[in-house]
């Protein structure tokens, strides 16, 4: 990481704005101007927004501060400085892990303190220039706040003292003079910033300071330092305080109640850091001192919470938490402390503030509000614009006390707020298994998460435009059961959606349903069976989702298919087992109409025995799609035979239309989706009073989809967690209580038997443990099995018997509808290829408007189940650039390339600006790290040699001479225009970069 000289940065800003309409990647329509005429007041100065970057990665370098200012930050908390700096400060890399709640292992500037000082002064100048040049404000409406730590001796050291003094008045410093000079000689770059504006730039960069505590700062030292800063340095002072003041029990209970039970606290900090009572007394004394000196004093809540590193999130043993899990703690501490002062305590807030809660925090009287985690996530700094706009009409001038009732209410609501509860993000990493490529990397991860690779951004956009028939036509290219999957697909796509890193996934499944409801009937009415294109024939045994998909894809491409099923109706589990309240018959019937209309033949009620040799006499291809129906078993010490199998129960429930006799009290054993369906069905049965789901682990660890658990809870189903069933006896289910023990390999805390028994009323016990594949039937057909009892298959799902295939649950045991259809696609492709026919799974290209897509960046919103939802889709395959969004240092950029690639935007990494924080690697959807894997531009030879990145160093810009590390790792010299030295791709990228982004070198 290297600071950019002021002269270069000034030209960079002017050129990038002209060339790309952005500054450090911030698009100009995200530049923030307060049009409300309202403001907040801090230390007698007006600020056009109460927001800013918290001292941290977003305020370390000049360009970071510029980016945060452009998007609406007006209270800029500069990254902390301390005596230990530069290479003497051991910061392990990567140092940020912001996948969900955020952790870091860096807490003060990595630059030398004098370099940090220069960065801040450069930013101070640039903000004045941009304010005028971009006409964001006539007068300064922003403020810098310095942050120092962690001991008095260090703060008094000549290095830190010079820093503080320089911030109090920078006019005599070298960097001040340099900035003045550079601007004076470059006035031709500006239209609205005039030379006379230079003299209006105040040399008082910071009239205020925030004291960083923690990281070894002893409690008694806090008061000493604060008094020093007030009395000796005459600075308005904020003191950072931490959730440790709330006590370990409160923090632990809050986390556990919100689903963060895996966060491992470090008890040491709760014992040895400042205690609440002492903190209150200290603040009272300091407030009195500040008053005498006519200075302001307040607290910054909160800095962070230390947690133990137990899952390898970052290197080292301890990490520092921020983000959405910190909110309930910070706001609780704010409320508790404010009460002690009857509301007369100025609070600078930090800890999980974001678009969704910022207005409510501000409404309590708290100001300013600084953020870190939200702007480390996708959308990056551009999230600030939306936040600043949201609160601009709420600004009320100077601090006038805290509204204790509002803050108390907020603190009570916080642990229940869905945006802060763990379950909002139902997955860990969203990363795909695909390796990050050097070029053409943009991808819509949803389409990869979807087992049938539906063209999601395209059909979502079409539904948004109300082009339902086009959307439906695109959906059915890959999906043989659009109605069923539009209703009950387990939507793996949604667990990869980029929006999970904003707020919540796009409601992809609902968008499909909207297309189905509006277009399916018309579409199906117009289907005409395609004439047969081959004399080959296939038979599919089993009319479940897997069999029907195979059949549809084959017939639609001209091959004759007959489907045979032992049952009298199609759709297997979906038709016979899944309750009607989850999948209405009309959705199933509609999908079946589509398959039939294409000309698939059916034979229902056939004999269950399968004779492959016999079938082969009539058919060239045999596909077994018979599902997994062999009942699974739960072994109990006593009464296993009294338990009812869940599938048998659900089948009966459907046949009897819910009129089943279960008694008053039902227990359902299991924690998966089948257990949820079973419990919900049982709850609806006549005479049933209680239904209890019994599970060995905690509810958080249930494998069932969260939506299904919620639906069951809503239906009145009770959950008894940490109970292991032992026996069924006399209408009772006897269970052993479990406790949570150590984490197992899956990272989940495993249940440990306690020996304590519990008895539950249970007129009926239903067991929902997984069904199995009927392996004896397969063996009888001559199909070889693997060690798990599943058929051995090749990549086309063909068994050891030539032209005999398997698809769906029979292949791997109980899975999902869409996985069964995916198998159907694989099998159909192979059979069609063998028969000399093409498969019609072609892709549709929709061109998206770039400006519209860039405008969507940084905008948070809750999902909405209507066509409008398409506005939340980011069309990630057209514009991804998450690595550009999330880089605090702006070290990743895109460049436009006219030809030679699939995509017109390619990513370039600027080595000199990167501090290897790792954040872009967390958010890039591929397996890889943009800061290591993308084409890299180097600023000097030493950095080039110190890296293994593919990329180039400009040796002589005018002559076009480069040193290049090629795709295969070779180092070659290349001059622009030369042929056959480097690849066509690198050549295009280098030429485009030099031509359009030369100012970045
Ligand atoms: C209660 C429950 C809820 C579920 N909920 C969901 C959900 O919400 N979303 C989701 O995606 N998945 C869900 N699933 C899983 C999903 O239903 C299955 O993965 C899917 O139906 C598998 O399709 P398939 O074609 O492989 O098999 P099946 O649906 O089992 O179909 C197999 C077909 O083969 C026929 N057959 C079997 N043996 C023979 C034979 N010898 N001769 C002739 N015909 C035969 C059967 O009659 C049946 O029609 C659920 C499963 C259950 C049990
Ligand atoms: S935002 Fe749209 S394109 Fe991107 S992953 Fe989500 S649904 Fe797919
Ligand atoms: S490029 Fe990546 S690793 Fe480097 S500073 Fe930016 S986000 Fe961090
Ligand atoms: S995050 Fe960057 S490197 Fe990764 S896929 Fe998106 S554009 Fe490519």
Image (tube, rainbow, N blue to C red):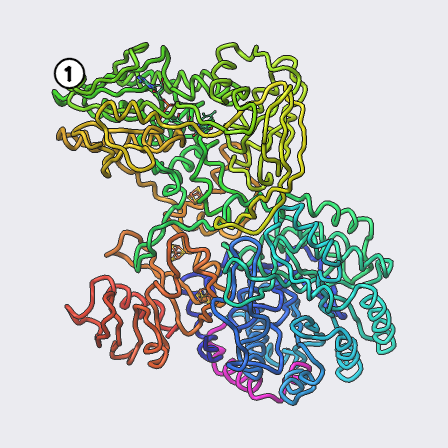
Q: In this view, does 364 lie above or below 452?
A: below
Which residue occupies 43% across, 38% down?
Answer: 492
> For residue 456, what is the image quadrant?
top left
Q: Which of 453 and 957 is in front in this view?
A: 453
Residue 240 included in the magenta stretch of the image: no
Q: Give the camera-side residue of 986 and 722.
A: 722
Q: In which quarter of the image is residue 196?
A: bottom right
Give the labeled residue for mark 1. Answer: 618
Range covered by the magenta-colored residues = 166-190
778 relative to 405 in the view: left or right: left
424 or 784, nearer to the observer: 784
Q: Where is residue 269 in the image (x, y as percent from the top left)?
A: 69, 66
Look at the image and tell me whether residue 167 can be seen.
Answer: yes
Label 1 CB sits under 8 Å from any ligand 1 atom: no
Predominant secondary structure, magenta span:
helix
Give the image location of residue 975, x and y in percent: 21, 75
Mark yes or no: residue 840 visible.
no
Would you say 154 lies left or right of 528 here? Answer: right
The C terminus lies in quadrant? bottom left
Q: Position of residue 568 (x, y in %)?
A: 36, 10
Looking at the image, in which quadrant does ligand 3 appear?
A: bottom left
Q: Is residue 80 positioned above or below 457 on the image?
A: below
Q: In this view, does 164 lie to the left or right of 915?
A: right
């Amino acid at each position: 990481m290297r600071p950019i000289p002021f002269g270069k940065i000034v030209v960079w800003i002017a050129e990038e704005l002209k060339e790309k309409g952005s500054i450090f990647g911030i698009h100009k329509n995200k530049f923030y101007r307060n049009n409300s005429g309202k403001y907040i007041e801090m230390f007698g100065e007006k600020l056009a927004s109460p927001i800013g970057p918290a001292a941290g990665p977003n305020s370390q370098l000049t360009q970071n501060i510029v980016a945060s200012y452009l998007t609406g930050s007006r209270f800029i908390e500069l990254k902390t400085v301390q005596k230990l700096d530069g290479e003497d400060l051991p910061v392990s890399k990567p140092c940020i892990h912001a996948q969900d709640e955020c952790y870091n292992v860096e807490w003060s500037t990595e630059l030398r303190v004098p370099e940090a000082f220069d960065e801040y002064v450069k930013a101070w100048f640039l903000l004045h220039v941009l304010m005028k040049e971009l006409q964001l404000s006539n007068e300064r409406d922003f403020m810098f706040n310095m942050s120092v730590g962690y001991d008095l001796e260090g703060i008094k050291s000549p290095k830190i003292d010079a820093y503080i003094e320089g911030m109090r008045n920078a006019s005599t410093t070298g960097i001040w003079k340099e900035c003045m000079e550079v601007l004076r000689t470059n006035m031709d770059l500006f239209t609205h910033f005039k030379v006379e504006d230079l003299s209006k730039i105040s040399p008082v960069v910071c009239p205020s300071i925030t004291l960083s505590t923690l990281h070894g700062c002893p409690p008694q030292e806090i008061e000493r330092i604060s008094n020093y800063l007030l009395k000796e340095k005459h600075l308005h002072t904020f003191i950072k305080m931490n959730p440790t003041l709330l006590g370990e029990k409160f923090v632990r209970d809050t986390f556990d109640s919100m689903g963060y039970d895996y966060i491992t606290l470090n008890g040491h900090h709760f014992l040895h850091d400042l205690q609440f009572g002492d903190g209150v007394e200290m603040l009272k004394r300091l407030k009195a001192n500040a008053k005498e000196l006519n200075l302001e004093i307040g607290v910054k809540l909160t800095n962070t919470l230390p947690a133990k590193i137990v899952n390898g999130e970052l290197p080292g043993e301890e990490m520092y938490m921020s983000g959405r899990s910190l909110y309930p703690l910070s706001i609780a501490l704010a409320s508790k402390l404010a009460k002690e002062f009857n509301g007369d305590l100025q609070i600078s807030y930090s800890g999980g503030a974001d678009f969704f809660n910022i207005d409510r925090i501000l409404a309590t009287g708290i100001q300013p509000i600084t953020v870190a985690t939200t702007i480390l996530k996708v959308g990056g700094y551009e999230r600030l614009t939306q936040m600043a706009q949201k609160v601009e009409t709420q600004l009320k001038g100077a601090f006038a006390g805290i509204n204790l009732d509002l803050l108390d209410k907020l603190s009570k609501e916080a642990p229940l707020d869905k945006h802060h509860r763990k379950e909002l993000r139902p997955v860990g990493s969203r990363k795909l298994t695909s390796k990050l490529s050097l070029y053409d990397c943009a991808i819509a991860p949803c389409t990869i998460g979807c087992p049938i690779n539906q063209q999601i951004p395209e059909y979502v956009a079409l539904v948004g435009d109300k082009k339902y028939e086009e959307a439906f036509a695109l959906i059915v290219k890959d999906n043989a059961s659009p109605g069923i999957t539009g209703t009950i697909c387990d939507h793996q796509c949604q667990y990869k959606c980029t929006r999970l890193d904003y707020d919540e996934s796009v409601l992809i499944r609902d968008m499909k349903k909207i297309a189905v409801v509006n277009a399916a009937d018309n579409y199906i009415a117009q289907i005409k069976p395609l004439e047969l294109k081959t004399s080959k024939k296939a038979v599919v045994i089993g009319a479940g989702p897997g069999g029907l998909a195979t059949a549809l894809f084959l017939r639609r491409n001209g091959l004759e298919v007959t489907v045979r099923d032992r049952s009298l109706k199609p759709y297997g589990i979906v038709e016979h087992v899944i309750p009607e309240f989850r999948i209405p018959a009309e959705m199933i019937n509609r999908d079946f109409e589509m398959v039939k209309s294409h000309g698939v033949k059916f034979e229902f009620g056939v004999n269950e025995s399968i004779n492959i040799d016999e079938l082969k006499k009539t058919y060239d291809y045999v596909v077994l799609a018979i599902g997994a129906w062999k009942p699974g078993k739960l072994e109990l010490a006593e009464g296993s035979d009294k338990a009812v199998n869940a599938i048998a129960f659900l089948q009966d429930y459907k046949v009897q239309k819910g009129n089943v006799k279960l008694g008053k009290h039902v227990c359902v054993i299991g924690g998966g989706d089948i257990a949820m369906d079973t419990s919900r069905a049982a709850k609806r049965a006549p005479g049933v009073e209680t239904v209890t789901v019994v599970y060995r682990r905690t509810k958080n660890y249930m494998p069932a989809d969260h939506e299904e658990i919620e639906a069951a809870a809503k239906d009145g189903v009770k959950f008894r967690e940490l109970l292991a069933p032992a026996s069924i006896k006399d209408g009772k289910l006897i269970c052993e209580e479990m406790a949570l023990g150590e984490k197992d390999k899956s990272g989940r805390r495993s249940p440990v038997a306690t020996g304590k028994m519990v008895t539950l009323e249970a007129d009926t016990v239903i067991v929902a443990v997984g069904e199995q594949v009927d392996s004896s039937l397969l063996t009888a057909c001559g199909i070889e099995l693997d060690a798990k009892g599943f058929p051995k298959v090749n990549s086309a799902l063909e068994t050891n018997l030539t032209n005999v295939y398997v698809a769906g649950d029979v292949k791997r045991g109980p899975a999902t509808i869409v996985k069964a259809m995916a198998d159907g696609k694989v099998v159909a492709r192979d059979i069609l290829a063998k028969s000399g026919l093409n498969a019609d799974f072609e892709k549709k290209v929709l061109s998206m408007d770039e400006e519209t897509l860039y405008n969507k960046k940084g905008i948070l919103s809750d999902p909405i189940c209507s066509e409008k939802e398409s506005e939340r889709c980011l069309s990630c395959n057209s514009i991804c650039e998450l690595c550009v969004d999330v880089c605090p240092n702006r070290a990743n950029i895109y460049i436009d390339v006219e030809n030679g690639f699939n995509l017109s935007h390619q990513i370039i990494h600027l080595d000199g600006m990167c501090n290897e924080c790792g954040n872009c690697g967390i958010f890039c959807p591929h397996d890889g790290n943009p800061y290591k894997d993308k084409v890299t531009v180097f600023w000097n030879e030493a950095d080039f040699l110190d890296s293994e990145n593919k990329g180039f160093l400009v040796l002589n810009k005018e002559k076009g001479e480069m040193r290049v590390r090629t795709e295969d790792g070779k180092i070659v010299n290349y001059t622009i225009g030369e042929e056959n030295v480097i690849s066509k791709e690198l050549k295009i990228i280098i030429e485009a970069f030099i031509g359009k982004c030369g100012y970045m070198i």
